[in-house]
Image: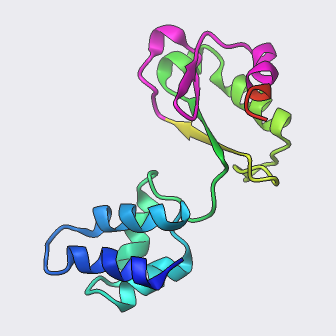
């Protein structure tokens, strides 16, 4: 992280109200997540309390507090996907990637698996999105083939 870049981000929001979310979004772009160092630096160099920064960063799912993988896999857990067995799909993805309970990013840093409320394509349930590509009408058997395209 470059303090110079972070200083530029902080100063661009100086004197403005309601800037915490966009400031943190810009800060997150520096490393792909909000490290403790970034959050602490923002608090020390702005009028924003560390508790407020941490509260927002942990409340909103758009913020990450640890590094994420090169490829982001979003697994829809909305109603249509849920009833179409998205849970089994998620379990299959975790098994295929070697993720244990509580892990969301592979050891090699290639994949991060995220559960999302809805991907907006219920007619294709169950659905995952890898980076910007949506895959629908999935079965557990199709998961490995999809992942091969990104390994």
Residue 27: x and y in percent read 41, 68
Q: What is the quadrant of residue 6 in the picture? A: bottom left
Residue drawn at point x = 77 percent, y = 18 percent = 140
Residue 119: x and y in percent read 46, 26
Residue 117: x and y in percent read 47, 34
Most distant residue in the bottom direction: 44
Q: Is residue 48 above or below residue 76?
A: below
Residue 62 in the magenta stretch? The answer is no
Q: What is the quadrant of residue 128 in the picture? A: top right
109 to the left or right of 114 = right
- Marks counted in the figure total 0
Q: What is the quadrant of residue 118 in the picture? A: top left
Residue 19: x and y in percent read 23, 68
Coloring scheme used? rainbow
144 to the left or right of 105 = right
- Nearest the viewer among 43 and 31 is 31
Q: Tell me if residue 123 can be seen.
A: yes
- Nearest the viewer among 87 and 9 is 9
Q: Which residues are magenta?
A: 117-146
70 to the left or right of 15 = right
Q: Is residue 1 above or below residue 111?
A: below
């Amino acid at each position: 992280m470059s303090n110079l870049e972070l200083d530029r981000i902080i100063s661009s929001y100086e004197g403005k109200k309601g800037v915490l979310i966009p400031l943190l979004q810009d800060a997150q772009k520096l490393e792909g997540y909000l490290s403790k160092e970034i959050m602490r630096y923002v608090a020390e160099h702005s009028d924003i309390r560390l508790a407020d920064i941490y509260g927002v960063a942990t409340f909103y799912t758009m913020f990450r507090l640890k590094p994420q993988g090169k490829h982001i896999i979003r697994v829809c857990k909305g109603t249509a996907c849920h009833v179409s067995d998205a849970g089994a799909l998620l379990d299959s993805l975790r098994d295929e990637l070697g993720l244990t309970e509580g892990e969301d990013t592979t050891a090699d840093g290639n994949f991060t698996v995220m559960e999302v409320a809805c991907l907006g394509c219920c007619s294709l349930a169950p659905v995952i999105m890898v980076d910007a590509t949506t895959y629908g009408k999935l079965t557990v058997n199709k998961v490995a083939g999809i992942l091969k395209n990104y390994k």
